[in-house]
Image (cartoon, rainbow, N blue to C red):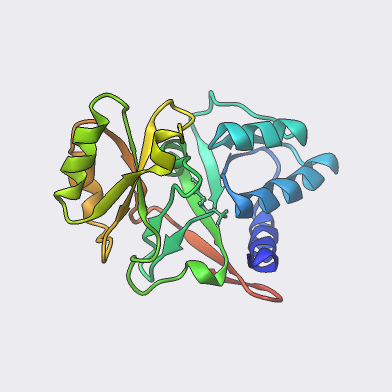
Amino acid sequence: MFENEKRMAAMEALKFVRNDMRIGIGTGSTAYYFIEGLSELVKNGLRITGIPTSKKSEELCRSFNIPVDYNIKDIDIDFDGADEFDPYGNLIKGGGGALVREKIVAYNSREFYVLVDHSKYSERLHKFPLPVEVLPFMSEKTLENIERLGCRASFRDDKKFISDNGNYIIDCVFSYTDPELESQIKMIPGVVEVGIFRHLATKIFQGTIDGCRIID
Ligand code: 5RP
């Protein structure tokens, strides 16, 4: 859906990539367009090192001959998609189940550029169920503890979905996903990471039919 908007956002963001940059490479259908465009630039001589945020994106990078290295301390810019964003730059991520690596890379990048289509915008985060990655150990109890914070929660694909880190994802439906919930959920034992990305985005690239709006 909204493929052209996703492509436009990716193409605009690619203009910020320079030689010798170390860049975070996101996960999902919008990130795919970024990876595809990046592969063309690499083919034409651009030198970059990529830090992919999932096994899937790593495979894609390797198939496109984009250099990959995880032993990088300084990441210049991370480029990734999002499932929802608000006017304050808070995000919900993890629809593809890659939130743990996505958050580590975003947190450790000097800049974090988010690539989205128009459907991802909300005045208040409420549209997309909040993904939470949890350890399998006593995960039913972890789910109950999350629900106590006021949501309906369920294991993604009845526990058949296993993250790149060997964990389950619990999807949580809140009437409003208050960004403050990030720290409250993270305090629950068994929770590995929460798909709320608070104040991490530095620019949001929102694709339009024939261009892209950059929100700083
Ligand atoms: C994966 C993510 C993705 O960035 C998010 O799901 C957006 O994906 P898409 O670009 O396909 O809409 O957080 O874990």
Q: Nearer the viewer, residue 107 or 55?
A: 55
- Image quadrant where one finds the N terminus: bottom right
Residue 90 locus on image (x, y percent)? 36, 60
Q: Residue furthest right?
A: 44
Asked where in the image residue 185 lies, by quadrant, the reply is top left
Q: Residue furthest left?
A: 148
Residue at 45 percent across and 34 percent down: it is 160
Residue at 69 percent across and 35 percent down: it is 61
Q: Is residue 93 above or below residue 216?
A: above
Q: Count of labels shown?
A: 0
Residue 82 locus on image (x, y percent)? 49, 56
Note whether residue 121 is visible: yes
Residue 22 locus on image (x, y percent)? 60, 37
Residue at 40 percent across and 72 percent down: it is 122
Would residue 195 appear left or right of 67 to someone viewing this image? left
Note whether residue 216 is visible: no
Asked where in the image residue 52 lies, by quadrant, the reply is top right
